[in-house]
Amino acid sequence: VTTRWERDPRVVWRRCLDRTLIQPPGHDEPLVLNATGRLVWELLDEPLTEPELVATLADVFDRDTTEVAVEVTGFLSELREVGGVVTG
Amino acid sequence: MTVDGIVRRIASFGLPGHQRAAEPEGFTRLTETPLDPSDFDRVMREVRVLRLTGFLQAVLAAEALPVTAEQRERAVEAHMAACAVVLGLERTLLDLVEELERHGVEVVVLKGSASAHLLYPDPSLRMFGDNDLLFRSEQFDRALEVLAELGYRRPAAARPGFARRSEKGVTLIGVDGDEVEAHRTVLSGSFGRTIDTRELFVSTVWFRLGGRQLRALDPDTGLLHACYHAALGDPDPRLGSLRELAQRFALQEHDPGRVLEIMRRWETGVVVARAVELVHRHLGVAVIDPVADEVAGRRPTARERRAIDSYIGENRSHAARMVASLANLRGNRAPMNGAVRSHGRRSELPRMGLGGRSLRSGGRR
């Protein structure tokens, strides 16, 4: 629960209106984050715990935290798998 | 407003209001209704070629240009394609700098990524199509060797050491088709002769990219470099180059006193004057700055006119620049070379596809 997530500083990225493109080391092409993914990416400018991230997103989207938590867990896992984020 | 006018306004979008000559109250809507398909096609073509997709995104975000849903999506797709190129180039840049520094070669990043991260509030505004790297003259050959080991090749063969003596630099093509411009100075020809290249390395600044610190020109030499590029880079000034110069003036990070001192020493006042005048003429931006005040009304001498023509005139060529530069050589010992010139930039965009998979979060159920 106290694990903090943050962007891998080695990732290069750009905003593109409501999307964000990220290119972690070892990738030949960028990955596209949609509007929600983009928001997560922006929030991870500073290290956050998963509960902190969930609480913020639930508040922004006015959604149930349990529901949001499931999606955030999956998204962070996927982002870590591609080298977009690290935990500390 | 004409298509040309719209493109110019896109290129100048976001510049401080006090610098916009005709719009003291800020940026107004470019049109009241979406452009018709053919005009929008022309705008998109220009925006892509001139690498202004980031500024177009800013214009759309500010609702300064009404567009249809389809036009908006086309603009986004064009920007995403440009971003894909830029991100690929930045990944390459990080690898190149690491390898060059590992071999003891100092690297200063010119324009491109350095400008994007240092000059703009959001680097997504500034697109680019290659990596420009400046090396110390004495390390230039070593840098080319390292780049060659990494698979970078010149478009045409040249004798070893030839480029170091005669050119601003060389264009190299990587195995993936990416382009690196290796520079030993920031300008060739007459006006380049008076540049003290050692000074370019004296007070560089740093920018952060991909977890690394990379070097860039300081705001003073960077401003002069932007002037050279804006004034002498192309016969038809590129709006992106003019925007870059206007952006540097707007940031006001330079020291006007030092810029003027270097400008006099490098004898490039007429180039700065031309650059400022082009910014005003093409972007409608009045540059308010002591440097601009100093060069206002500066007209080229006959010799300077010939020198400028060697860059942008009808008979421009590397050889013409070399001939024009002879007049500037105090020792009359001009090297009898220069038949080989650096390869021109490729204009096509983009080279990388955007095949990345989409990461979804909020939309998943």
Image (cartoon, coloured by chain):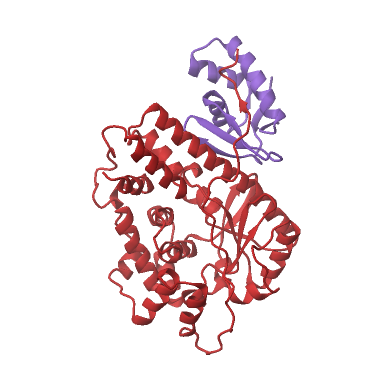
Chain colours: A purple, B red
Residue found at x 43% / y 53%: B240
Give the image quarter of residue A79: top right
**Number of numbered labels in the structure image:** 0
Q: Is residue B295 left or right of residue B175?
A: left
Q: Is residue A77 left or right of residue B268?
A: right
Q: Position of residue A45 (x, y in %)?
A: 57, 34
Residue found at x 51% / y 79%: B322
Q: Position of residue B224 (x, y in %)?
A: 45, 65
Q: Is residue B99 above or below residue B321?
A: above
In the orientation shown, which residue stands out farthest toward the front? B38
Of the 4 image quadrants, the one containing the C terminus of chain A is: top right
| Residue B145 visible, this angle | yes
**Which of B308 and B35 lies nearest the eye of the viewer?**
B35
Residue found at x 58% / y 84%: B336
Q: Position of residue B115 (x, y in %)?
A: 51, 52
Q: Position of residue A84 (x, y in %)?
A: 66, 33
| Residue B202 visible, this angle | no
Of the 4 image quadrants, the one containing the N terminus of chain A is: top right
Give the image quarter of residue A36: top right
Residue found at x 55% / y 85%: B334
Give the image quarter of residue B248: bottom left
